[in-house]
Amino acid sequence: MSNSTAIVRRTAVCENCGSAFAVRVWPDGRIRPIGSPANCPCGGTDFRLLS
Ligand SMILES: [Zn+2]
């Protein structure tokens, strides 16, 4: 009954184009934009979390 599997909602920016997105951060560290398949519309797949 731990929270280790919780998915956290955060804001992140695309490392490629700098666009900001609402994202979900998965327990294993994956970052996925909410409402998008997987990537930024620019094709970027790397995202940096905003604090
Ligand atoms: Zn982008």
Image (cartoon, rainbow, N blue to C red):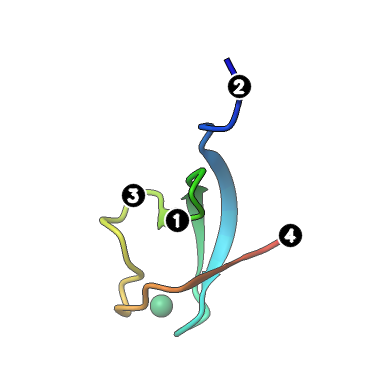
Left or right: where 50 falls relative to 19: right
Amino acid of disc 2: Ser
Residue at image mark 1: 30
Which residue is drawn at the image coordinates 51% and 54% (left, top)?
Answer: 29
Q: Position of residue 46 (x, y in %)?
A: 45, 74
Rendered view: 41 above or below 30:
below
Residue at image mark 4: 51
Give the structural element (helix, strand or loop) at label 4: loop
Amino acid of disc 4: Ser
* Dot placed on the residue nearer the N-terminal end, 3 or 4: 3
Residue at image mark 2: 2
CA gap between label 3 and label 4 equals 21 Å
**Pointers 1 and 2 in contact (CB under 8 A)?**
no
* Dot placed on the residue nearer the N-terminal end, 1 or 2: 2
Which residue is drawn at the image coordinates 36% and 70% (left, top)?
Answer: 40
Mark 1 or mark 4: which is in front?
A: 1
The local crowd at label 3, few if under 14, some if 14 to 19, many if 20 or more residues have their Cα within 10 Å, is few
